[in-house]
Amino acid sequence: MIYQTEASMVIMLTTRKEKAKILSGISNHVCYWPKKDELFNCESFVSTLINSTETNAFVKQEICLKNTLTGKEHSFTQCISPIWNEDGTVHDSLCVIVLLNKILKQKQDSNTVSIIIHCEDGISKTGIIITVLNSIRDLNIRKSINIFNAVKDLRRQRMNMVPTLACYTTCYSLLNEYCSIHL
């Protein structure tokens, strides 16, 4: 997906290692990006870690993805944000604001519009970030926001986005924090 869309950024709203269930039912941890000085092979792609820096808000990795069939390379930034609780709430909203600012700056500075946002279930933390980003966009364009409609629009595209009251409340909290800083 990164290669197809030529994504400039991947946001991982998860820990550095994600739980994966194996057929036997035993829980295992899987890391699916390269480690320093190693190549990570996946079918017809090889990825290499170019650079990695760590802040309180996220781990930023510069990664080069190479298609071994064509030789074409694509570089992107991956931000791993491990500051989320299992229920979709955050233990440090300021760190999420820093991450949101990074995403908004990347969208502004980059020629590509493709940014991939990913979490374990694909609907909770991802839904929160997309809801907040869409609401910030609406605030800049229309000077108003409607979180209910933002979530409703997301759910038309993917069922169960922002699935719990805790996730929904987190959207409001993050937007309130963002507005108190930026307005």
Image: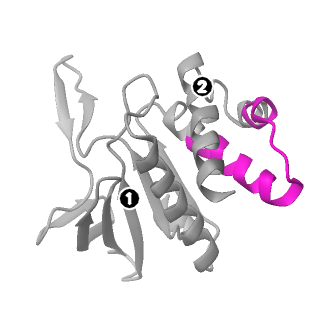
Disc 2 element: helix
- Is residue 136 left or right of 47 when viewed as pictured? right
Can you say which quadrant of the picture contains the C terminus? bottom right
Disc 1 element: strand
Instruction: Estimate the x, y position of residue 18 in percent, counting from the top left.
Output: 27, 37
Q: Quadrant of residue 107?
A: bottom right
Q: Quadrant of residue 87?
A: top left
Q: Which mark is residue 169?
A: 2
Part of the protein shown in magenta? 129-151
- Is residue 79 left or right of 136 when viewed as pictured? left
- Find the residue positioned furthest to the left: 37
Q: Quadrant of residue 170?
A: top right
- Label 1 is placed on what type of residue? Cys
Examine the rendered structure and indicate whether residue 95 appears above or below residue 45: above
- Label 2 is placed on what type of residue? Thr
Q: Magenta: predominant secondary structure element? A: helix
Which circle's residue, 1 or 2, is located before the other in the chain? 1
User: Does the magenta portion include 133?
Assistant: yes
Color encoding of the figure: one colour
- Is residue 144 left or right of 28 when viewed as pictured? right
Examine the rendered structure and indicate whether residue 91 appears above or below residue 102: above
Q: Which mark is residue 79?
A: 1
Residue drawn at (13%, 68%) of the image: 36
Examine the rendered structure and indicate whether residue 19 appears above or below residue 57: above
Cα distance between the residues tagged 1 and 2: 24 Å
Instruction: Estimate the x, y position of residue 129 in percent, counting from the top left.
Output: 57, 44
Neighbor class of circle 2 (other Cα within 10 Å; few <14, some 14-19, many 20+) is some
